[in-house]
Amino acid sequence: MAFKPLDYLHLTKALGHVGLSQIPLQVLMSPAAYISTINPGASSLCSVLTGISQPTLTPYHRLFGRVIVSPLLLAHATLYMAFFVQNSHPEFGLLVFKRIRDSDVQCGLVAISSAVFLFLFARPRGAKQNGLQGWLMQGPVQERRRIFYLYHVFLVAVLCGAAYCHVKQAQKYVIQALAASALNGACSWAVVQWGGRR
């Protein structure tokens, strides 16, 4: 049984919604004090609430991003682009030539590009850096950690900003991620300030 166009588009939208809906949880699992020289492994809010140490939780944050969030967003973008390429437009020939000019699609492309860069540059700590990642990550461990963290947070911010402008349904997930970031930052700051669990 073949997919009807509405079934196909419903699935495509659902993949994007599910991928974006996971970002607030990703933020809550992230080590917000990663660049802190005092306690880079300070507990995130998720670590405090679950009792799982941050060094144990961080690999799950990384894995969840690689196996769930990035693939779902990439599948969403790929299926939409395939739909645009396979359908015609009376004025532009192919629908893709019309849609690529629309700001919502351009924001979506910026968002998916940042998700791909997040996927490519998320690497296990201590992994050997080659190519562009090696060029970006030179110097002492503290400096490499700081550059990686700032680059990672910048890409997440670009992803969230572009997703917010992409479609209205994404806005609630971006607002939740912003609130989660504030809560997680406050929790990690408190742990660093008052010497809580490591």
Image: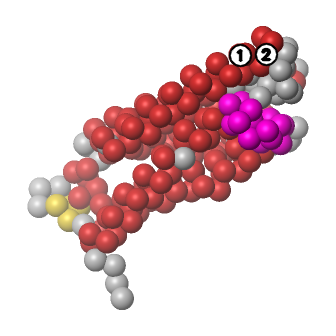
Q: Which residues are magenta?
A: 44-58
Q: Residues within 10 Å of mark 2 (few under 14, many from 20)?
A: many
Residue 33 is marked as none
Residue that numbered label 1 is attached to:
189
Residue 52 in the image: state x and y as whole percent: 80, 41
Q: Secondary structure at mark 2?
A: helix
Q: Secondary structure at mark 1?
A: helix
- Relative to 112, does residue 188 appear above or below in the rendering? above
Figure coloring: secondary structure
Q: Residue at x 64, y 31 (%)?
A: 152
Going by the numbered disc 2, the residue's amino acid type is Val
Q: Residue at x 34, y 44 (%)?
A: 169
Residue that numbered label 2 is attached to:
192
The prevailing secondary structure element of the residues shown in magenta is helix
User: Is label 1 in contact with label 2 (beta carbons under 8 Å)?
Assistant: yes
Tell me the quarter of the picture where residue 33 sits: top right
Residue 133 drawn in magenta: no
Tell me the quarter of the picture where residue 164 sits: top left
Residue 120 in the image: state x and y as whole percent: 66, 45
Q: Residue at x 85, y 16 (%)?
A: 195
Q: Residue at x 47, y 34 (%)?
A: 176
Residue 153 in the image: state x and y as whole percent: 61, 28
- Does residue 46 appear left or right of residue 7 in this picture? right
Going by the numbered disc 1, the residue's amino acid type is Trp
Residue 96 in the image: state x and y as whole percent: 28, 56
Residue 130 appears in view = no
